[in-house]
């Protein structure tokens, strides 16, 4: 009977993880990442600097490397930058290699 409980617990965990992933995917449809608008502790996931990998770990308001999901097309109005803009800026801001 003990192995039955273990199997049941594993099955429950697997189903819960799948449901959470589906909910997150459904929630992000029609939305985009908007950088620089999240208040401290209200970011949606990892930052671009790689200093954390979870939601709610932003330390300051409006950090340029923290993001929140917003309705597509509304990022500019919120005063933020889209993921594409942040990626483009990162490419142009890369330092030149030594000796160049």
Image (cartoon, grey):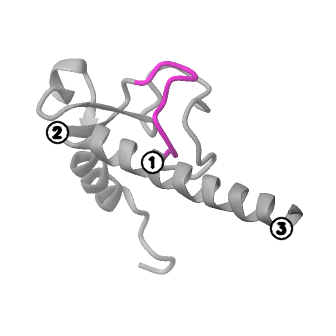
Q: Is residue 81 above or below residue 42?
A: below
First reached walking from the N terminus: tag 3 or tag 1: 3
Q: What residue appears at the point 58 percent right and 23 percent down from the top-left corner?
A: 41
Q: Which residue is mark 1?
A: 19
User: Hey, which residue is sitting farthest front in the picture?
Assistant: 1
Q: Is residue 46 magenta?
A: yes
Classify residue 4 as left or right of residue 31.
Answer: right
Q: Nearer the viewer, residue 43 or 83?
A: 43
Q: Nearer the viewer, residue 73 or 31?
A: 31
- Quarter containing the N terminus: bottom right
Classify residue 96 as left or right of residue 14.
Answer: left
**Residue 3, numbered circle:** 3
Q: Which residue is mark 2?
A: 30
Tag 1 secondary structure: helix
Q: What residue appears at the point 47 percent right and 55 percent down from the top-left corner?
A: 18
Q: Position of residue 69 (x, y in %)?
A: 32, 33
Q: Position of residue 6 (x, y in %)?
A: 79, 62
């Amino acid at each position: 009977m003990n192995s039955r409980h273990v199997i049941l617990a594993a099955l429950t965990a697997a189903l819960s993880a799948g449901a959470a992933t589906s909910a997150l995917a459904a929630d992000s449809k029609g939305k985009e990442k908007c950088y620089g608008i999240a208040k401290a502790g209200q970011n949606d996931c990892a930052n671009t600097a790689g200093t954390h990998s979870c939601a709610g770990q932003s330390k300051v308001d409006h950090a340029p490397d923290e993001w929140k999901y917003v309705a597509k097309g509304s990022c500019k109005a919120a005063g933020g930058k889209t993921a594409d803009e942040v990626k483009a800026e990162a490419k142009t801001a890369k330092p030149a290699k030594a000796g160049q």
